[in-house]
Image (spheres, rainbow, N blue to C red):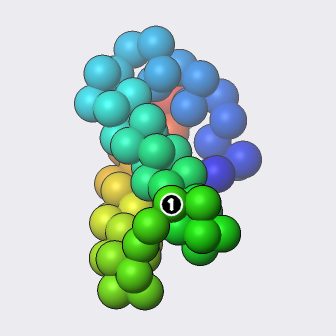
Amino acid sequence: MFPEFRDQISQLKVSDLNFVRLFEKHNTLDQTIRHMEAHLEPGTHDEIEQLKKEKLLIKDALYNILKKAGNAMN
């Protein structure tokens, strides 16, 4: 996710607890969605779609944090 922000991600993982929390939540949701889609965990189509929406909102929040961090570095 966001390879163009690799340096900012590394820096924020050690300096921003909110970023870390969101990053971990995004990864957890991604894994849950993949498991549900592979029928390794129970989940309805509607539940999967709701999790995807939540994951997208978190991804947007992460992107905004990364953009701000990138601007602050310049």
The residue positioned 53% from the left and 67% from the top of the image is: 36
Report if residue 1 is visible in the image: yes
| Residue placed most toward the observer, 7 or 54 | 54
Q: Is residue 34 above or below residue 47?
A: above
On the rendered structure, is 16 left or right of 8?
Answer: left
Q: Mark 1: which secondary structure?
A: loop
Find residue 44 and report its horizontal and vertical position in percent. 39, 81
> Label 1 is placed on what type of residue?
Glu
Find residue 37 and report its horizontal and vertical position in percent. 59, 73
Find residue 34 and report its horizontal and vertical position in percent. 60, 63
- Per the image, the residue denoted by label 1 is 41
| Residue placed most toward the observer, 36 or 53 | 36
Figure quadrant of residue 53? bottom left
| Residue placed most toward the observer, 2 or 74 | 2
| Residue placed most toward the observer, 66 or 74 | 66
Figure quadrant of residue 56? bottom left
Report if residue 68 is visible in the image: no
